[in-house]
Image: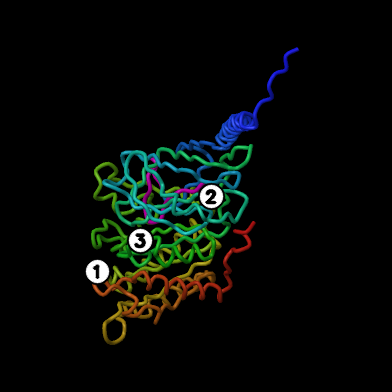
Amino acid sequence: MRRLPLPSVASILAILVSATTIVSASFAESIAGVTEDFVTKVHVPHTHPLLFYHGRWDDAPETWWSASGFALALSTPSTLKSITLNLGQNTTFPLVALGVSINYGEWVPFNASAGPNQVPLPFLLQTKNKRDITTIRILTQMYFSSQLHLESIDIEVSSGSLLPPTLIPYPASPLAFQFIGDSFSTGYTTPLGALQAWDFIVAEKFKAEQSIVAQPGAALVDIFSFGNAHGMSYQFFKTEDTSYYYLTVHNYTTPWNFRRDLPKRTHVVVHIGANDASQNVTQPLFVSTYIDFLTRIRKELYPTQPFFLFTPWGWPQPSGPNAYYYDGAYQEVLDARKSMGDDNLFLVNTTGWVGYEDVFPDSLHPSVEGHAKIARLFSAWLEEWGLKPLEAWLAQ
């Protein structure tokens, strides 16, 4: 029998390398397939029952007032690969200024317009999960003609789990502020609007939900003031802010359904009066209007919630003391309500909170640093009053 020659060492090595390459390629393809299985696409129409709307929206649905927006939650910790906002034709042209926060992390500003819009996730992917879920919050920054017309949201996530993430009820904070005011409460003239406003900062510090119903130039008394067709004693009860007056698509008002304020507001903060004074509204008329306004919202909306009434911090001057208005009026309002049996009102004396170094010299409105200072002072005031940030709730 003829003996076959033994294969050389070189030929054996060649076969092994070839086989290893084939197995490695096959394994890589298998891993790629498994990884692809972990990627989930979630489509959320604006009618989805688990989409959490906050602030004020009309039936389109489009936003009104500062810092209105939405939030949603996914069932597992996930890596967000992309978020696409699909916005309708009523979205403010040419763009609407928005902010996004992932897993209660830092707010990142971005602009969007009608049509599909990619949310800038690369800035946010390092945010740590504080719960065993993924949360997304998006809101409007500005206070006038700032309509976000939502059609749907498309989310692409990689969960690292065989179980794909699903939409779950958003875990809204049990603490919810209602802020009522004028330009001082909207972040007026700051680069990022509501994202840099003292009231929004306070709500974030206390891990609370918030609604900011405030309008630059608006008086409390129902008069035309600095472009606002109505005062807050009228407009507060409407879905629309006063920019409706200048729109052609939606130039009317509708009553706001306060049952849509979820969760129900737990604390009410009012800072108003600067524009009444600027429009020469008399002190007796301002006081009586304020008393009537508080009486109505106490009776119809907030029967047990504490009310915090800011006194004016005044108009800072380059030299000399601040220019104040309605001296004694806010104490008069408080005393009148207490005489009616309402003991759950508190006067927040803001004298000395804002100096000339805390405002933009051209508008005398708080700067970014000024808003941060007001937020620190009011947060300290609230903690001394007895309210504490909900750190334990966020860590659940």
Q: Which corner quadrant holds the N terminus?
A: top right
Residue at horizontal 65%, vertical 32%? Answer: 9
| Relative height, residue 243 to residue 206 (above, below) | above
Q: Which corner quadrant holds the C terminus?
A: bottom right
Q: Position of residue 120 (x, y in %)?
A: 41, 49
Residue at horizontal 54%, vertical 61%? Answer: 207
Residue identifier under label 1: 279
Asked whether residue 3 is drawn in magenta, I would say no
> Mark 2 or mark 3: which comes first in sequence?
2
Residue at horizontal 29%, vertical 68%? Answer: 275
Q: Position of residue 322 (x, y in %)?
A: 31, 82
Mark 2 surroundings: few (<14), some (14-19) or many (≥20) residues within 10 A:
many
Residue identifier under label 2: 135
Mark 3 surroundings: few (<14), some (14-19) or many (≥20) residues within 10 A:
many
Between disc 2 and disc 3, the foreground one is 2
| Relative height, residue 249 to residue 297 (above, below) | above
| Relative height, residue 297 to residue 374 (above, below) | above
Where is residue 143, by image quadrant? bottom left
Residue identifier under label 3: 193
